[in-house]
């Protein structure tokens, strides 16, 4: 039977490889092939289980027939009834506690069981925990605003009726599986927004998690060391970008905004450690109003806006407040904090480099610079050790010239 089964499924497997989901004449054939493969898998599993059962049964002697019918003890009968207790008959708090321990994939699978579990498994409180756990470090207020804007825009668009395909239904049984990756995600964004599937409500936290996980939502964030593989000039900087997650590689694709006549750039393979939520709401083209100038002292760590020219967006660059040339750097005699001039040092550049130091006014600092050395903008003082240690992890191996 096994050779016959393999031969019968070979045409279906070939059609699955060559048929594209976006090519409509092949849609029915593709879904029929998918069902054939899954049925073959179940038959193989059933045959293997039956063969193992027969082998085990033949290896042991059959037990003697019971002399008379016996009634199990009451305590055992109660345990059996308790074991057969349906999930929905659990107390509400117990069921909620069980659902809290489920992974996102398990929650999505449970939501496909029945309407009651679908409602419970789509609760915002459950999915908010998963969003915070996986995405909290890279999602900021700007990402939430853009998600709300997408929902508002989608609500105004017509939603054409679309009959669910068999592949859609099977993907419900295997959430976030190779089925969804191979076919369901090959549709364009408009079709994905319009399709009718067992997905959570569009305005729920579960839908947001799903959009992030499947790479359907480009969210704003910031990337350390932009274009890391091909541009040493961005070391120890952090630039605004829109990012999309790729769960196959567990990395991001970053899309940097255009500047001047140059188009937007994309960088693939951005790792989690290089992504952060924007700590400020200042857009990349706007000057940040510095509110920390009076507090800066030698040794303080800071980020400062810098851009190459007026068309380029600001990036944030890491540095440390240094001592003025007139100061002997003695901590007991230093009066640099009383001076109107602040010395900013970028110590990953060699001494004597034109990028090593710059000064700004403590009282009336605005954007300063020119087309040769670039333009320095607003300053943000780093307040936590975590922020400082994150910057230090990107310290270059060799000092830059």
Image: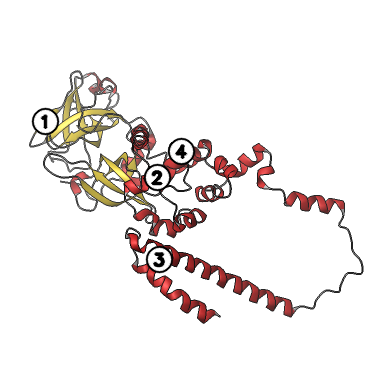
Residue identified by numbered label 2: 211
What residue is disc 4 on?
Answer: 205
Residue 314 horizontal/vertical position (percent): 20, 35
Q: CA distance from mark 3 to mark 1?
A: 64 Å
Q: Earlier in the sequence, mark 1 or mark 4?
A: 4
Quarter where residue 30 is shown: bottom left
For marks 2 and 4, the one nearer the N-term is 4
The residue shown at (32%, 60%) is 23
User: Can you say whether 15 is above or below 310 in the image?
Assistant: below
Considering only vertical position in the picture, is 356 above or below 296? below
Query: Which of the pair 185/247 is nearer the observer?
Result: 185
User: Which badge, 1 or 2, is on the more N-terminal residue?
Assistant: 2
In three-dimensional space, the C-alpha distance between marks 1 and 2, rounded to whole angstroms, equals 42 Å
Q: Quadrant where the N terminus lies?
A: bottom right
- Residue 121 position, x and y percent, is 55, 43
**Residue, x 25% and y 50% (percent of image)?**
267
Which residue corresponds to mark 1?
369
- 258 sits left or right of 31 in the view: left
SS for dot 3: helix
Q: Within 10 angstroms of label 3, few (less than 14), some, or many (20 or more) residues?
A: some
Mark 2 and mark 3: Cα distance apart in space: 28 Å
Q: Name the front one of labels 1 and 2.
A: 2
Give x and y (percent) for residue 13: 42, 71
Residue in view at x 41 percent, y 74 percent:
11
């Amino acid at each position: 039977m096994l050779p016959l089964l393999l031969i019968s499924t070979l045409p279906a497997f070939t059609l699955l490889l060559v048929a594209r989901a976006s090519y409509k004449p092949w849609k029915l054939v593709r879904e029929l092939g998918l069902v054939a493969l899954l049925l073959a898998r179940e038959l193989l599993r059933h045959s293997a289980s039956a063969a193992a059962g027969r082998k085990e049964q033949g290896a042991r002697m059959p037990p003697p027939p019971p002399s008379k019918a016996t009634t199990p003890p009451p305590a055992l009968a109660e345990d059996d009834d308790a074991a057969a207790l349906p999930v929905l008959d659990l107390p509400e708090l117990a069921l909620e506690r069980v659902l809290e321990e489920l992974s996102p994939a398990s929650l999505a699978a449970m939501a496909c069981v029945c309407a009651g579990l679908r409602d419970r498994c789509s609760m915002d409180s459950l999915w908010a925990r998963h969003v915070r756990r996986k995405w909290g470090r890279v999602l900021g207020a700007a990402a939430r605003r853009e998600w709300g804007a997408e929902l508002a825009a989608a609500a105004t668009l017509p939603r054409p009726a679309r009959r669910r395909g068999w592949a859609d239904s099977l993907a419900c049984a295997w959430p976030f599986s190779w089925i969804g990756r191979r076919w369901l995600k090959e549709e364009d964004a408009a079709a994905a927004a319009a399709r009718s599937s067992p997905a959570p409500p569009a305005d729920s936290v579960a839908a947001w998690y799903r959009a992030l996980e499947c790479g359907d939502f480009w969210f704003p964030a910031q990337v350390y060391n932009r274009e890391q593989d091909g541009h040493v000039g961005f070391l120890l900087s952090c630039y605004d970008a829109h990012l999309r997650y790729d769960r196959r590689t567990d990395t991001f694709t970053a899309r940097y905004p255009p500047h001047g006549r140059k188009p937007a750039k994309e960088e693939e393979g951005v790792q989690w450690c290089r992504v952060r939520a924007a700590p400020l709401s200042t857009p990349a083209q706007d000057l940040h109003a510095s509110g920390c100038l009076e507090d800066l002292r030698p040794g303080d760590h800071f980020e400062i806006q810098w851009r190459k020219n007026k068309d380029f967006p600001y990036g944030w660059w890491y540095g440390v407040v240094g001592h003025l040339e007139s100061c002997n750097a003695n901590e007991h005699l230093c009066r640099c904090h009383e001076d109107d001039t602040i010395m900013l040092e970028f110590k990953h550049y060699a001494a004597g480099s034109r990028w090593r130091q710059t000064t700004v006014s403590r009282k009336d600092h605005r954007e300063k610079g020119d087309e040769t050395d670039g333009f320095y903008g607003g300053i943000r003082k780093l307040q936590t050790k975590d922020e400082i240690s994150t910057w230090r992890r990107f310290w270059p191996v060799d000092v830059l010239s």
